[in-house]
Amino acid sequence: MENKQPIRLKSISEFHRSRGLPQPEHPLISVIDFSKIPRTTDIGDKSWVFDFYQISLKRGIDFKMKYGQQKYDFDEGVMGFIAPNQVFKINPEKNSIQKRSGWMLLVHPDFFWNTPLSKIIKQYEYFDYSVNEALFLSQKEEKTVNGIIENIRQEYHANIDKFSKQIIISQIETLLGYSERFYNRQFITREKSSHQILNRLEELLTDYFRNDDLISKGLPTVHDVAEQMNVSPKYLSTLLKVLTGQSTQQHIHDKLIEKAKEKLSTTNLSVSEIAYELGFEHSQSFSKLFKSKTSQSPVEFRSGFN
């Protein structure tokens, strides 16, 4: 039986050996020229998981990537982000003769030890997307991040002194900050893709609340919705926040209130019965949510139709 376990690389030195590269100059951080990574034919046979961060910018892409359980949308000239303990698989394109270029930054979490970045790096949501589109860059944006990477490369190639680590940490923080800005811009400018997700969310929630079986299914959770849309919960909420100002949970509640208003205005069901049909265990919880959304109690809303 084929071994399905991913190959775990615990150190940056292990990564260098696995790709046929010279030993890294620093055990906890490495900037690799993508064009110098030897091509191998068996890289797509296994899944991989790293104990370190990988940030990359690649041109001449000749592979598809599976990240978590979904495809990672890579294309020419884009950045990708992988955090420790995330499983991914690379599927090389056959007979590709494209010229590859770009870079790969590998940083072990131990490099951040006893620095503020060790606590905040997990807050950068692009590291946490179980499925995600890569970061598309303009020429100006690419020039900016390339400059930061060159600063990091030069700093750890030089003689390491007591200032080196903090200088490199500052450069990484700058890189992460720019990346966050560019991702936020991408949510807005990639209008077609973003609006397709909005339309899909609307269809999904409409179907969910149309099928009057919330008693057995219960209210949809953010995790359930994101899973059905093949995106991670954080990615979906971030996208919706940028485009609509509301989180996924707020969108679910809006659809719920819409259904509640329909029942209050077109049926003779009691508030308790409506709450039950909408998946609430306690009618008080339903009434509280309804009032927070409409500034009226369910009874007050219904009385407006009498």
Image (cartoon, rainbow, N blue to C red):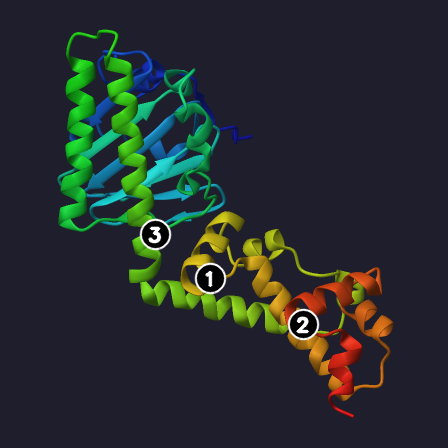
Residue at figure coordinates x 65%, y 76% from the top left: 258
Residue type marked 1: Gly
Badge nearest the viewer, 2 or 3: 2
Determine the secondary structure under disc 1.
loop
Q: Which residue is under mark 3?
A: 184
Q: Which mark is residue 10?
A: none
Q: Classify 10 Å Cα crowding around label 3: few (below 14), some (14-19), many (20 and above).
A: some
Could you say which quadrant of the image residue 175 lies in? top left
Q: Which mark is residue 295?
A: 2
Q: Which residue is under mark 1?
A: 245
Report whether residue 47 is seen: no
The answer to which of marks 2 and 1 sits earlier in the sequence is 1
**Residue 232: image location, x then y, percent:** 51, 49
**Residue 233: image location, x then y, percent:** 53, 50
Horizontally, is 288 left or right of 83 in the view?
right
Q: Do the CB atoms of the residues marked 2 and 3 lie less than 8 Å apart? A: no
| Above or below, 221 relative to 103 | below
The answer to which of marks 2 and 3 sits earlier in the sequence is 3
| Above or below, 207 relative to 82 | below
The quarter of the rendered structure image containing the C terminus is bottom right
| Above or below, 19 relative to 23 | below
Residue type marked 2: Ser
* Mark 2 vs mark 1, CA separation in Å: 20 Å
Residue type marked 3: Asn
**Residue 161: image location, x then y, percent:** 22, 7
Residue at figure coordinates x 70%, y 79% from the top left: 261
Residue at figure coordinates x 33%, y 20% from the top left: 15
